Amino acid sequence: MMNSENNAAVEVSRRKRRNRRILWTFVAMWVMVVLAPIPGYFMTTDTVQAKGEFTDNPRSAYWGEVRQGGSGYTTDKGLEAGNLVNDGGEVWRVLRSDIILPYGAWLIALAIVAIGGLIAFVGTQKIEGELSGTKIKRWNSYDICIHWVVAVTFFIMSISGLILLYGRAVLIPLFGREGFAGLAMLCKDVHNLLGIPFSVALVMMILPWLKDNMFRSEDAEWLGNAGGMFDGSHPSSGKNNAGEKIWFWMLAIGGTVLIVSGVILVMPNLEPLRSTMISMHILHSVSGLILIAVSLGHSYMGSFGVEGALDGMLTGEVDAAWAKQHHDLWYAEQMGEEAPANEKSAQSSTTGPAGLSTGKVSAS
Amino acid sequence: MARMKFLCDAERCIECNGCITACKNENDVPWGINRRRVVTLKDGVPGEKSISVACMHCTDAPCQAVCPVDCFSTTPDGVVLHNKDICIGCGYCFYACPFGAPQFPQNEAFGVRGKMDKCTYCAGGPETADGSEEEKRKYGSNRIAEGKLPLCAEMCATKALLAGDSDQISQTYTSRVMQRGGRPQTWGWSSAYGE
């Protein structure tokens, strides 16, 4: 009994040892299969290095250098004239034709569809309750003037830029090449010349408006429910709501990119390198397309999207009820500083269902 | 159908700039415009080689692909021409071209680009009547219509610059390579100067 158990234990340990031996043999075989060819690499490298003169064919080295964009001496005084081959343009061609053109069109189409969706399913945000008849000064004449100069120049430059970008695909089939050429020439000149008033006006608009467009604590809540666009609520907002602030900063940053890249593109006299012009063109078209798409949303929200919003930018004054509904913190600020007491009580009597804003006004 | 090409034999080009002079004279190329240029690599050191470069009249030309007003056209001979009536001087062809061929006159205020100018393979313009005064003024001469090849190649003293049907000139070049031998060690700089 004892003996047979002993035998069985010996048998098991022997089998285990055999299995382990088989396993290690296999591992060793695999390692050798992987390692065996490696010395060949060292030997090959040695041989190639020994025959260096054969691989160094001067003619092939010359064309290799040309292909890599090497520069040489030339009597031509043009910029980068010594460079025989510069294939950076191929990258630009792919970016412009295969990425920026189609996706830019999709972006603008998406903006239009989104606005169509807002019109169809959300509709105009009405002023709740009665108009108060009391007017609050929202924009002074400088603000109004500079806004519309930027808006009109931006609009014309968007149209001319889009014509230059998409004209070949869309308008040449309609007008023919000769017919389109005149329009394109006009667009180019208008685009170049209007760049000057646009740049000046944009800077003159951005700087004074910086103060009112700094993000504050209430903006997070405003963004959290999209300004109450879908649930009908009216989250708190200062003079500018978070959406307006985002648009402001997009315009400030994108506009700066547009101005800088535009100046470099329109003035070959500054002697920018071709690679610089290519990257500036990419920046210019990308930021332009994004701003065009977002500007559509801004135009809608500032006109049909929100009742009473356009009055502010036309006359400079908004109705107190509108101000209380959309910009309660700013309204409270204005009332606290400027409004006489009797007008203030007249305001609270016309308060609509927005209990939130009532609370804010009384708190002030 | 012939496909017209330029081919520059870098072993033969001696950087005399005769092709440029011929081009400028034949086509009345405006001041500041270079339809052709000669570039020398390793200038003044052993291994120096020169090559004359102009518009290469590409098949599927990048300039043609990016032109926003579609002013380029390829002739049945494979010559890429552009219509100066349609060109708006935007500079996109210059961004796209790997060879720096498109040139822009800057006669207007602030150096705004005028209508693009480039090598026409001495084939005039796409929209003008062959040999007309208008064609001469806008594009230069039309030697192709007269049955001649571009003057740069015709004037080349060492026959480094070849112009003509691509099959024929590549055959010429191949036969040269065969006669020289496959290895450049047997001729050229090192065999002449023992470098």
Image (cartoon, coloured by chain):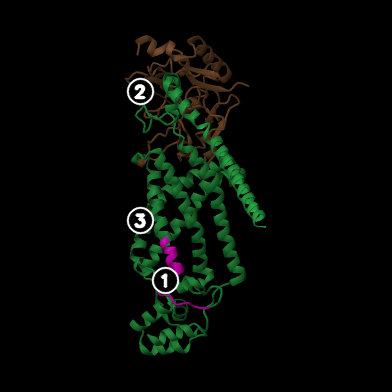
Chain colours: A green, B brown
Can you tell which mark lies on residue A200? 3
For the residues tagged 2 and 3, is the chain the same? Answer: no
Quarter that holds the N terminus of chain B = top right
* Residue in the image at 62% along x and 50% along y: A10
Query: Would you say A65 lies left or right of B146 here?
Result: left
Of circles 2 and 3, the one toward us is 2
Q: Give the range drawn in magenta.
A: A233-249
Q: How crowded is mark 2: few (under 14 residues within 10 Å), some or many (20 or more)?
A: some
Image depth: mark 2 or mark 1 in front = 2
Res. B20 visible in picture: no
- Closer to the observer: label 1 or label 3? 1
- What chain does badge 3 belong to? A
Residue matched to label 2: B42
Does residue B10 sit above or below B118 in this rendering?
Answer: above
Task: Between residue B82 and residue B187, name the one nearer to us.
Answer: B187
1 or 3: tag closer to the N-terminus: 3
From the viewer's perspective, tell me whether residue A18 is left or right of residue B101.
right
* A94 to the left or right of B40: right
| Left or right of A5, for residue A316 | left
